[in-house]
Structure formats: structure tokens, C-alpha cells
Image: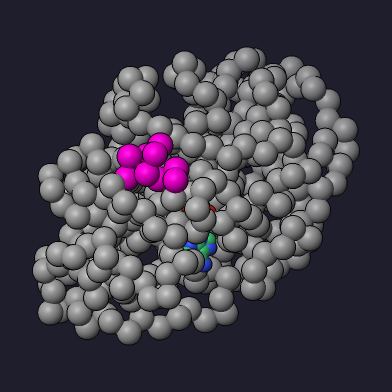
Amino acid sequence: NKQVVLKDYVNGYPKESDMMVTSNATICLELPKNEGGLVLLKNLYLSCDPYMRGRMNNTSKGSYTDSFIPGSPISGYGVAKVLDSTHPDFNKGDLVSGITIWEEYSLVTNPKLLTKIQHTHVPLSYYTGILGMAGLTAYAGFYEICSPKKGDAVFVSAASGAVGQLVGQFAKLCGCYVVGSAGSKEKIELLKKDFNFDEAFNYKDEQDLDVALKRYFPDGIDIYFENVGGKMLDAVLCNMRVHGRIAVCGMISQYNLDQSEGINNLMLMILKRIRMEGFLVLDYHHLYPKYFDMILPLIQEGKITYVEDIVEGLDNAPAALVGLFSGKNVGKQVVAIAHE
Ligand code: NDP
């Protein structure tokens, strides 16, 4: 049973060599019938998420989840198939999503973090992204925090990623003017051609982010969906309109720094009466049914596009995970371990 194990706690930027792919004892693919409450899983898809970097720290200070344990396999969101079950809620052949260990097969003794997949007419990998945590994050962050209105000028950073690509498309569906930033030419093309953004720019090509934002928002920004933090947030504050809203979803530019960068322009929040609100998707799980009611028809009618970057095999999983922090992923980063 192949596993991805964290070697030791991580300082600074994570590297592929911070993890190793090992094989632990062989696993019996049938459960003992006299022991109830067990579920045996074949893991299919793993989600690579930026928050997993926080779990590689030796302290959970400032994080909302526990640290990974060095020497043990890491875990995250994923999709799996039930190979055998002695638990009343799960049957052989069920497809499930939820917390998954980064290994080929898992024996689960407490399956309360698993949910049965009901809609199987979409790609199963979508449950790591658009139909999983990233999708709900985009939905809750945009509709609950940003108070969008038709005609609003919306800016999204890390716009081609798992969350950003959806926020931009939701904003377009609301009739907003939408601009995204991302880190490569390929991603800028994707934003404009596939995700229907009005404009997009490569923040790595810009000498001055304030000048870049003024180019695309001569009359200012009503809504900023914050995924990156740091210099981008400072530049955005200078370009917000009066009564603008900032949903603080993430600050990936800060996750690998010992100390986060200071923000110089916070005082502008007063002058411009900006509402800036952080949020955690964990507080919005009750919205899953409402979100599914909205998103499933949009997917089926082809009104939403979701781009995934799928690498094959656990051997490639460490590189895929650390690639999030250099922008290697184009779209939602997924690891496929097996296809059903
Ligand atoms: P993405 O799929 O967008 O992948 C991360 C991307 O971040 C990279 O592809 C890269 O794109 C960009 N990036 C990496 N380093 C930097 C940097 N130093 N400066 C600017 N951009 C950088 O990830 P997700 O969509 O899954 O997550 C987006 C954000 O949302 C993250 O900050 C994450 O932590 C947050 N999040 C928050 C949740 C919540 O509950 N609040 C839940 C889920 C996610 P590029 O090439 O454009 O630089």
C-alpha cells in the first residue's frame, strides 16, 4: 500500500523532498465480518490545497487544522470507492468524498468525515474541486461576503486556480465587470477565453501593481476577492471604491514566509468605508445543498467551465502539492491514484 509521508516539519517553501513515497504493510482487501463499523476504501482522487502547507508547520498557531505528523501519511480532501464495509451507512461499490489519506487503500474506523456521492453524472474528480471545498469556498465567499450587484467591478487574484476561476464566472453570471490576475501567459489566455473574464493580466509582468489596476479599473473596484495578500492587497486598497467589499479568502503569498509582510494602506479602509471580511469555508457547510442546486444545472448546461490539472499516480503527488506555491498548476490541482 503506497503512501505519501511527511518526513519532517517544514520551514519556508515546501519541497518535493519534504515528503517521501513509501510502501507500508500489504493491506487485506476484505474486511473481517465479525468486526462492525469498518470501511475499506480504494482512493481515487486527491485534492491539493494551499491550506495543507499550514499543516506542515510544527505549530498549529494561526491554523484551523492540526499539523500533520512527521513519519505518517498526510491527508486531505479526496474521492474514494468503498471496496468493503461492515458499517451500516456504507456499502461495497459506494463512491464517497471527504477526508482521505494519501495512500492507495485506507481502512477507516470512523467514517464520519465521509459523504456518499449522490450525483455521478459529472466527472468524479469534480468532488475535489467545483463540487467540493473549492467550489463551496467560491460560492460562500462571493455570494455571502461580497454582496454582488449587477454592474459591479470585480477583481479576483489567483484567478485561474481552483477557487478563482469559479469566483470570476459567478461574477460574470451576476452581470459584473470582471478582471483577474494570474502568473503566466497561458493562465491569462484561459481567463479570457475559457472563463469569460472581461480582462486579465499577468501580475509577474507588472512593474507597479497600482498602475496595472488603474489600467483595468479607471473608476475603481467594488469587489476584491482576495486569494494572495501582500503587495497585491496594498495595491488593491488604493483602487477600491467607496463602500467596496473585500472577501479575504486566502493569502498564499504569505504562507511560506517566517513573518507576513506588512500592509501599508489599511487606513484607506476608513476613507473609502471599505468592508473587509475574512471567512472560512468550514462555517458554510450547511450551504452545500443550496450550492449543488445552483451548480449542477450550470455544469450540465455548459454555463460553467471547470479546468483541472490532473497528475497521475502517488509518485507525482508531492511535486503536485508543492507546485501550488510556484503556480505550476493550471486550474484545480488533482492527483489521480486510480480511476474507479
Ligand atoms: P489555486 O488553485 O489558485 O493554486 C494556488 C495558486 O496561487 C497558484 O497556482 C499560483 O497561481 C498562486 N500563487 C502561488 N504563490 C503565489 C504568490 N506568492 N503570489 C501570488 N500568487 C501566488 O489554489 P486555490 O484556488 O485552492 O486557493 C486559492 C486561495 O484560497 C488560497 O489562498 C487558499 O489558501 C484560499 N482558500 C481559502 C479557503 C477558506 O476557507 N478561506 C478555502 C479554500 C482556499 P499564479 O500562477 O496565478 O501565481
Q: Position of residue 187 (x, y in %)?
A: 48, 49
Taking 88 as reference, is 236 left or right? Answer: left
Q: Name the residue rendered at 88%, 38% in the picture.
A: 25
Q: Position of residue 165 (x, y in %)?
A: 40, 44
Q: From what the image shows, is residue 263 above or below residue 281?
A: below
Q: From what the image shows, is residue 96 above or below residue 193?
A: above
Taking 8 as reference, is 157 left or right? Answer: left
Pick whichever, 54 or 187, lies toward us: 187
Q: How many marks?
A: 0
Q: From what the image shows, is residue 251 above or below residue 152?
A: below
Q: Position of residue 195 (x, y in %)?
A: 37, 39
Is residue 107 visible in the rendered image? The answer is: no
Pick whichever, 75 or 224, lies toward us: 224
Q: Quadrant of residue 88?
A: top right
Pick whichever, 202 or 20, lies toward us: 202
Q: Image quadrant for the C terminus?
A: top right
Pick whichever, 226 or 93, lies toward us: 226
Taking 204 as reference, is 295 left or right? Answer: left
Q: Position of residue 167 (x, y in %)?
A: 33, 46
Q: Name the residue rendered at 36%, 53% in the picture.
A: 200
Is residue 12 visible in the rendered image? The answer is: yes
Q: Image quadrant for the N terminus?
A: top right
Taking 178 as reference, is 203 left or right? Answer: right
Magenta region: which residues? 189-197
Q: Name the residue rendered at 74%, 44% in the picture.
A: 316
For residue 223: magenta? no
| Structure colour scheme | one colour
Q: Name the residue rendered at 57%, 44% in the picture.
A: 333
